[in-house]
Image (spheres, rainbow, N blue to C red):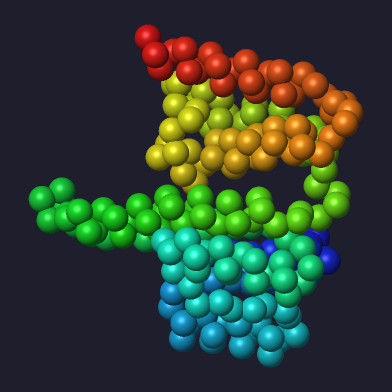
Amino acid sequence: MERLIGKIATVTGGASGIGEATVRRFVAEGAKVVFADRDGDRGKRVAAEIEASGGKAIFVEAHMEREAEAAAFVRQAADRFGRLDVLVNNAGIRLYHTVVEASAESWDEILGVNLKGYAFCAKAADDISIHPAHTPAAIAHRLLDMFEHPLVRKQRTAGHTRSPAVRQRTPGCALWLLLDTTRRRLRETTTQPPQRPDVIRRVTYDDRTAHRRRRR
């Protein structure tokens, strides 16, 4: 227990289901949590219960498919606590429609939350001044382990590494978000190469290989 003492975490879709369980577990582990959901009444109730038990949780009513609201939610966590350590993109919806029943509007609603919301929050988190321990070199050292995750390796083999639809809710999506951020920060802020330059070379090489496969 208490493995997240001092950590600042944000969780989307945190008013019910897996999201609520994540919020409660993070608080139990010592984190300060800011969570969002479009169910305002339930979100406020969860936050009140956590506060009553001595934990620290702040609820923000927001719709993840709206970029301004998603970004404001993430920024609020950093503004309140001074930094951001963890982002859990949990929010997701499912509409029980057949292919015939589904409409352009229902597809837009699903993709808005399940796909765009993921990207909006990740973009906002990337723009925030991350904890000093999260340096480009430190991040790069972890890339190889993620890159060798079985699910990520399966995606690379299939040549789908850059498909947002495939990456959604898989380690591969987190990998590429991390990779994009690391490359940029290495270029912008680091004067010395990471201690594991093979990490960047390995990932870059496989990315090009997958791209060539798709063009055939």
Dividing the picture into quarters, in which one does residue 97 lie? bottom left
Q: Residue 64 versus residue 5: which sits nearer the camera?
A: 64
Vertical placement of residue 200 versus 28, above or below: above
Q: Residue furthest front?
A: 188
**Front residue of 176 and 68:** 68
Which residue is at 50% across, 77% downward? 61
State whether residue 22 is above or below residue 103.
below
Q: Position of residue 10 (x, y in %)?
A: 64, 64
Instruction: Residue at the far left: name it.
Output: 100
Does 196 sit above or below residue 17?
above
Residue 108: horizontal and vertical position, in percent? 29, 55
Quarter of image, res 128: bottom right
Residue 49 at what x, y percent from top left?
Answer: 62, 86
Left or right: 183, with 100 as reference point? right
Residue at image coords 46%, 44%: 168
Percent across and percent down for residue 144 are 71, 28
Q: Is there any visible trace of residue 175 in the rendered image?
A: no
Residue located at (37% from left, 9% from top): 216
Left or right: residue 195 versus residue 21 is: right
* Whether residue 160 is visible: yes
Q: Tell me: 172 left or right of 200.
A: left
Q: How many marks?
A: 0
Residue at 66% in and 82% down: 50
Q: Quadrant of the N terminus?
A: bottom right
